[in-house]
Image (cartoon, rainbow, N blue to C red):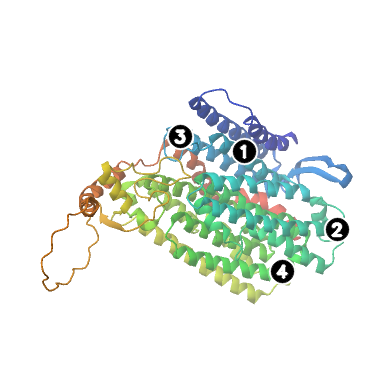
Amino acid sequence: MSWVLIALLGVPLAGAAALLAPFGTDAAARGRLLRVHGLVVSGLTFALSVVLVAAFDHGDAARVQFVTDLAWIPGLDLRFHLGVDGISLPLVVLTTLLTFLCFVYLCRGRADGPGQLLSPRPGGNRPRALVFTLLVLEVGMIGTFLALDLLLFFVFFEVVLIPMYFVIAIWGGRARRAAAIKFILYTLLGSVVLLLGLLLIWSQTGTLDMTALARARGTGMSPAVQTIAFLTVGIGFAVKTPMWPLHTWLPDAHTEAPTVGSVLLAGVLLKMGTYGFVRVAIPILPDGAAATAPWLGAFAVIGIVYGSLACLAQRDLKRMIAYSSVGHMGFVLLGFATLTPAGVNGALFGNIAHGLITALLFFVAGAIKERYGTSDMPALGGGMLTRLPHLASLLTFACVASLGLPGLAGFWGEMLALIGAFEPAAGLSRPLYLVFMALGGLGTVLTAAYFLLMLSRVTHGRGTETVHVPVLTAATAGGLPATGPTGDEGHEGGALAAEPGEKEGPFMTTADGGDASPPATPATPATPATPATPATPATPAASAIPAALVAASRVVPEAVSTARSRMPDVTGYELAAWTPLIALILLFGLWPKALLLLTDPVVRTLVGAP
């Protein structure tokens, strides 16, 4: 069955290569062909991962299975070494599932519907390039979780950077280029430090075989060398996780990325950093892990509290979800820092739970942005449960899952990480870790606070309309633009957003169906009478602007209310993309053993526990 791992890499790679061939059909036919191509290739890859799960020996999850070990560069003793165990298997399935659901989200629905990046448009939104980029991204993500050679792991680890850069830079929002450059600079600099650490391990041990290095548990490296190597590889993984204070690229990248980019970035790419800790840093460098674990725990809890406080200050929905990832990944790092089976199992469980829940959050946030034309929470106006009850209910479910409600997947990872901090590994300061546990508990309270505050602003209360000046001008010039974006997610627009290049200036807020009046100006004090002068004829602009604002103040609120009342609730293709995530969040929340049976045997081997 080792061919399954080759096929998992080969199918998306072949699908991407096929797109390099010229298409001789018209634009509409090309669009249909791209939809089918993306769905079939990603669906086949997901089916292969299901076959992998079915054939996996769940009774021996600690053993590396389906091993492929081929000579790659014989002169340097580099090998194309692949395998899967109880830690990597859930991440492989998560990767293929989210990629497939992204194509379902992109490819279904009306060709001119919102967010349909695969529909050719005047000016071009490069649908073939998007499918190609997502498939190459999938190859890199899967390869990272399958690689058992340190250099091969690094190659796959780096392959994902360029496709994600282009996803943000080409199909992102208005500030996409700055966000993409920030993303690539941070991650490339982290990768340079990571490579130095991997080369240090190679120079000390003479091998890049990850399974042999894990069995040796640091043999051949002094504690000082292990500490230096752990710091270097740890910084590289911490940038990708991201860990405070190396997180600043994440909010911009999430805010500007298209919906599918945010889903894959949060659902899979962040997991590559945490996977590196449990696959490379902790088992290969145990003395270095023990020496730096208190510092790792300190940065983790700072990230938990900082991320929660930053969420309370956010106005943008996507940016708030991005900062929530900083806090949630802090719990994952805290679990690793305990070096106990409970803590590390909690970290791995939180990894998968965060991937499912945050993917659902970004899917729903993207759908909200497509309908309203903005993700600014005050501009959304509240009352979504009245306007879009199903979409608002899904947003509520995802938020409640993310804040760690018992019975949903988000609960178990945080609880196990805190249990691990309560009783850390031998040699670690228990009073210090009790402080970490208390701060982590404070983070859970703050997490509930910012999610509930967001829901009270967006889904509850009386709905209001926020009308920007460009909308007033458009209304008086001959009609109100259609609500929501034009369909190109890379260029936000629509009734409630300013046109590119314009400032989002003064706005009016009215209750649903109410009248809006232009902003009042202070009364001018009376001045003494002056001798009459000949009247100056009013210019057309001087007389037209106030009249336009007055007319728009009467017309626009009703037009916006009518347009918003026609916004579609959850559509069939959205439900198809989101239902598997909802089902898995419920499954792992009610039956955590389904995941812990896979991870626990491997974790006990890695940390040397009986």
Instruction: Work out whether residue 326 can be spotted.
Output: yes
Would residue 11 be found to the left or right of residue 551 on screen? Answer: right
Q: Amino acid at mark 3?
A: Pro
Q: Amino acid at mark 2?
A: Ser
Q: Amino acid at mark 4?
A: Thr
600 vs 515, left or right, is right
> How many badges with numbers are in the image?
4
Q: Earlier in the sequence, mark 1 or mark 2?
A: 1
In front here: 475 or 312? 475
**Could you classify mark 1 by the number of other residues whose Cα lies within 10 Å: few (under 14), some (14-19), or many (20 or more)?**
many
Q: Which residue is mark 3?
A: 122
x%, y% of residue 268? 60, 49
Q: Secondary structure at mark 1?
A: helix
Q: On residue 93, which mark appears?
A: none
Q: Which residue is mark 1?
A: 135
Pick whichever of labels 3 and 1 is earlier in the sequence: 3
Q: Alpha carbon of mark 3 to alpha carbon of mark 1: how far?
A: 25 Å
Where residue 6 sits: x, y (%)?
A: 73, 36
Residue drawn where x is 81% and y is 66% of the image: 225
Three-letter amino acid code of the residue under disc 1: Leu
Q: How far separated are the C-alphas under marks 4 and 1?
A: 37 Å
Quadrant containing the N terminus is top right
Mark sitting on residue 292:
4
